[in-house]
Image: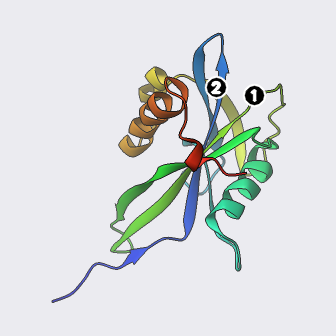
Amino acid sequence: MENIPIKSFSIAAYICRVEDGICKFLIIKRREPYHSYEWQMVSGTLEKGETPIQTALREIKEETGLIPDRFYSADDVEIFYEFRENRMVLVPVFVGFIDIEQKVVLSEEHVDFKWITADEADHFLIFNHQKKMLKKIEEQFVNNEPNEFLRIK
């Protein structure tokens, strides 16, 4: 019997800020050719010797110029099947809060950014796991006090 390989080589980082009690998430639009002009969260591949936490913080800084004021493990993974590679992919998810005013400075990989609410996700995001993750993060990290055990210092 043949097995489907399982790989974990990248991260997803959801950047949030709360304005007047409303949670907004940063989405960035990719430049071609990879996922041509798709809106997404910060994502990236682990470099040799990096932990997922280090990768997430590096990718946030490289792709947006931001440094989270508070940073958490979302205690979740995005799971999807890459049919072109015939593999299951597990992506650790992180949550970064921007509590003080910081300016977004995009990398060359991206052409635009927006701050959206979880309810606006259907208009921008194409992957269901991303839409669901926004709602989960809003519920567990904004509407309720985040579990301090998940905070990365």
Residue type highlighted by circle 1: Asp
> 103 or 36: which is nearer to us?
103
Q: Position of residue 127 (x, y in %)?
A: 40, 44
Using the image as rendered, state which of residue 149 and residue 88 is in the foreground. 149
The residue under the point 34% across, 79% down is 5
Q: Which residue reaches farthest top?
A: 20
Could you tell me residue 131's position as x and y percent? 42, 36
- Which residue corresponds to mark 1? 99
Q: Quadrant of the N terminus?
A: bottom left
Residue nearest the observer in this picture, 120 or 123:
120
Circle 2: residue type: Trp
> In terms of secondary structure, where does tag 1 sit?
loop
Up/down of 115 relative to 137, above or below = above
Residue 138 place in picture, x, y as percent:
49, 29
Residue indicated by mark 2? 115
Which quadrant of the structure image shows residue 14? Answer: top right
Q: Which mark is residue 121?
A: none
Would residue 81 be found to the left or right of residue 123 on screen? left
Q: Is residue 108 visible?
A: no
Quadrant in the rendering for residue 114:
top right
How many numbered circles does the render carry? 2
Residue at position x 41%, y 28% from top? 122
Q: Residue furthest left?
A: 1
Structural distance between the alpha carbons of marks 1 and 2: 14 Å
Q: Nearer the viewer, residue 134 or 45?
A: 134
Q: Can residue 93 be seen in the rendering of this structure? A: yes
Residue found at x 54% / y 43%? 38
User: In this rendering, which labeled residue sits more in front, label 1 or label 2?
Assistant: 1
